């Protein structure tokens, strides 16, 4: 198995051949990764549910689109939020990588209001047990790329998979043109 250092703060971009419907064409921000496993959120799966319907106090801070995102197939009844905050960050925010951090949804939104650029709320998360992610990486299911702060709050999440691939300075950029259904070519 390939030895992989912590991927926290990096993106997992689904390979075109990844057949799991939970992750087809997904972009996952890894929040935690160690010997016990990994945890992340899918950044490009918006739901039709407005943030105001489930977390009304946070709706004013939610970026466009102001909906809840499906963060992954695990614990869909639990919510977590990410926000980009320059500098040290306020109470109620924990840095994941760079200016990207987790928001404590139990904190009063007013504490973060002045410092949060935009907030994204996720229902559920993606999780991997010990060495599970490493096995999927060895199989070629995911590409590991650097994240950018804008990935967390992109207003058109349906284009994120292609956009992240397109910005790579390698052969991965060519995959951005991979057709949705290659059998139609």
Image (cartoon, rainbow, N blue to C red):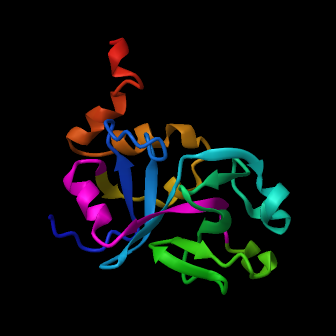
Residue at the spot 67% in from the left edge and 79% down from the top edge: 104
Which range of residues does the magenta coloring cover?
Answer: 116-142
Question: Residue 80, image x and y in percent?
Answer: 63, 68
In this rendering, the answer to whether 114 lies above or below 62 is below
Going by the image, does 152 lie left or right of 51? left
In this rendering, the answer to whether 23 lies above or below 158 is below
Going by the image, does 155 lie left or right of 56? left
In this rendering, the answer to whether 88 lies above or below 105 is below
Where is residue 127, by image quadrant? bottom left
Residue at the spot 14% in from the left edge and 64% down from the top edge: 1
Going by the image, does 144 lie left or right of 72? left
- Please check the rendered image and state whether residue 102 is part of the magenta-colored stretch, yes or no: no
Q: Say which quadrant the C terminus sits in.
A: top left
Question: Residue 116, image x and y in percent?
Answer: 67, 70
Residue at the spot 29% in from the left edge and 48% down from the top edge: 141
In this rendering, the answer to whether 19 lies above or below 177 is below
- Please check the rendered image and state whether residue 122 is part of the magenta-colored stretch, yes or no: yes
């Amino acid at each position: 198995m390939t030895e992989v250092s912590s991927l926290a703060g990096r993106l997992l971009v689904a390979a075109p051949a990844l057949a799991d419907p939970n992750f087809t064409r997904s972009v996952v921000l890894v929040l935690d990764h160690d010997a016990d496993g990994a945890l992340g959120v899918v950044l490009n799966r918006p739901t039709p549910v407005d943030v105001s319907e489930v977390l009304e106090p946070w709706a004013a801070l939610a970026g466009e689109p102001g909906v809840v995102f499906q963060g992954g197939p695990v614990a869909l009844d639990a919510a977590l939020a990410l926000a980009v905050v320059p500098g040290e960050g306020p109470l109620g925010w924990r840095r994941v990588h760079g200016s990207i951090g987790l928001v404590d949804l139990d904190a009063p939104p007013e504490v973060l209001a002045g410092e949060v650029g935009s907030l994204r709320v996720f229902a559920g998360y993606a999780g991997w047990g010990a060495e599970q992610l490493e096995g999927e990486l060895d199989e070629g299911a995911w590409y590991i790329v650097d994240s950018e702060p804008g990935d967390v709050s992109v207003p058109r999440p349906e284009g994120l998979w292609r956009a992240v691939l397109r910005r790579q300075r390698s052969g991965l950029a060519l995959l951005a043109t991979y057709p949705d259904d290659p059998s139609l070519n």
